[in-house]
Image (spheres, rainbow, N blue to C red):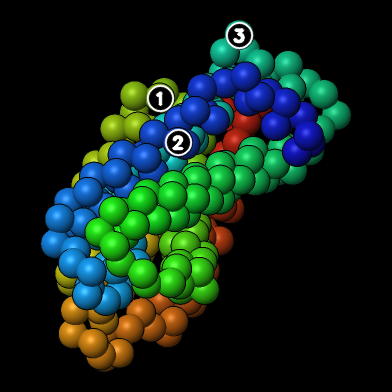
Amino acid sequence: MLAIEFKKIKRSWIVPLIFIAPILVVASGISNLSQYFTPEYTSAWPAMFIQSALAYAYYLLPLSMIVVCVLISARETQNNGILKMLALPVDRAKLSLAKFAVVMTFLFLEILVFFVVFLVAGKVAISSHNITEDIPILYLVTCCVKLFLTMIPAVALMWAITVVFEKPIVSVGLNIFLVLPGILVANTGAWILYPYCYSGYFISCSLRDFTTETDSTRFQLIPFLPCAVALFALALAISVYRFGKKEMA
């Protein structure tokens, strides 16, 4: 099923799409910050990463994943493709999970592109300012992995909304409506119940840790992890239950 799903999107616009947001956010973030660099500047890499990842985590990454979800879903609704698929002896739940696995693959690939583009742009930036600071690969990889993990519940909810509301304009509009207040919710105690702000909240905590040089605001796994797992499971269950249900009725 996974092989078939990947073949369906092989020639789609999804692959070029995942390059747009990382390139834009890294280029703007590093260029804005690099003007303050001096040869004596320390912690250039963490500063550049946080500067680039802040807008990316709150807005550009979620918005690009919304488009990915809609494009993957649209390929099934075109020419009644979903009806032909459901007519085959294929388990509907497994088919839904296979499509979600494709969505998660694109999430991983987009963050990988962000990581690679950031390394290249960051190396150019510090070299042009004669900064000899070593690349903190472990720090950057750890941050990107956490960015990926904290984004999973939001992507599950985006996919669930895309499945429930079949019209693209409705699912896109609702998802964007939920993304926009993310930075506001992240500054309240309700952030734990709002998956759309998880990745942004993680970067905000990293920013506070970096600027205050303390671990007092470090991202805490508890109560985040139980709540995130519960919301992820609920969203995934809804998407599996509703996938193709209307067509099968």
Q: Is residue 185 left or right of residue 68?
A: left
From the viewer's side, name the closer residue of 246 and 156. Answer: 156
Q: Gap in Å between the C-alphas at discs 1 and 2?
A: 22 Å
Figure quadrant of residue 66: top left
Q: Is residue 104 left or right of residue 23?
A: right
Q: Identify the disc placed on residue 19.
A: 2
From the viewer's side, name the closer residue of 6 and 140. Answer: 140
Q: Identify the disc placed on residue 183.
A: none
Q: Identify the disc placed on residue 79.
A: 3
Q: Identify the disc placed on residue 168.
A: 1
Instruction: Return the disc, 1 or 3, that comes first in the chain's sequence.
Output: 3
Give the amino acid at mark 3: Asn
Figure quadrant of residue 187: bottom left
**Mark 1 closeness class: few <14, some 14–19, many ≥20 residues within 10 Å:** some
From the viewer's side, name the closer residue of 8 and 223. Answer: 8
Q: Gap in Å between the C-alphas at discs 3 and 2?
A: 29 Å
